[in-house]
Amino acid sequence: MIDKFIDTPAAAVADIHDGATVLVSGFGGAGMPTELLHALIEQGARELTVVSNNAGNHETGLAALIKAGRVRKVICSFPKASHSWVFDDLYRRGAIELECVPQGTIAERLRAAGAGLGGFFTPTAYGTELAAGKETRIIDGRGHVFETPLHGDFALVKADLADRWGNLTYRKSARNFGPIMCMAAKTTIVQVRAKVALGELSPEAVVTPGIFVKRVTQVAHSAFSS
């Protein structure tokens, strides 16, 4: 019988290894898999490359992982915000690397990884420092930059509901990057608010099919919002 539920967040992240590339869902605090991230801090993996929309909020979740010194590099769209002081301090001191990627481009790079594509051309960032060292091409009279897929060894994602096969639904804007990150990672680990019986989720309502999900853990009463 297929049952992808794991008892605890700690057990779910136990095999994340040093040097892994970890995709982390979330748009600010919405959809951030905070309990999985805190379990990863306790687990001890180091030298991680983290792909996320932003570089952490306050001192919880991703910011806590960064503060603990476990992250070597952040690939994100919004590294600077009033509540991203942990990353900002480390970056100013040269203690962490940054690859800044436009938001639409980071989403499409993740989607390309999940779809098995070799890359794509986009006009975004053409003629800017973000295009330095990349292939460029004029298409229909407009400059484009070639971008490569963004694969992950692991994805840590927050969803709302899951059945034992790992089919997922999400809550409003907490959906954000979760579905494409599930597709772009070798191993997807998801925390959900509740487990539902097989067949309870309408096929029309399933956003992420269970084929893209390796493990699920239930966090019924998160100490953090969204």
Image (cartoon, rainbow, N blue to C red):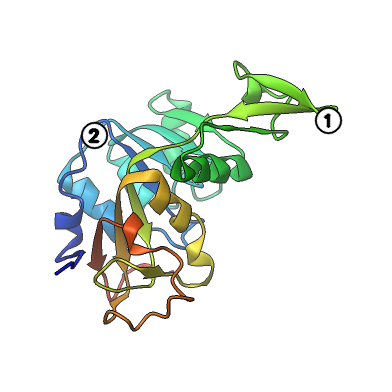
Position of residue 131 in the picture relative to residue 1 (left or right): right
Type of residue at label 2? Arg
Position of residue 166 in the picture relative to residue 172 (left or right): left
Q: Is residue 85 visible?
A: yes
Could you say which is closer to the camera, residue 43 or residue 60? 43
Mark 2 / mark 1, whichever is N-terminal: 2
The crowd level at tag 1 (other Cα within 10 Å; few <14, some 14-19, many 20+) is: few
| Image point (34%, 84%), residue name | 200
Q: Quadrant of the C terminus?
A: bottom left
> Residue 140 — which label?
1
Separation of marks 2 and 1 at Cα, in angstroms: 45 Å
Question: Mark 2: which secondary structure?
Answer: loop
Could you say which is closer to the camera, residue 72 or residue 83? 72
Image: 203 above or below 30: below
Q: Position of residue 56 (x, y in %)?
A: 44, 48
Q: Quadrant of the N terminus?
A: bottom left
Position of residue 44 in the picture relative to residue 131 (left or right): left
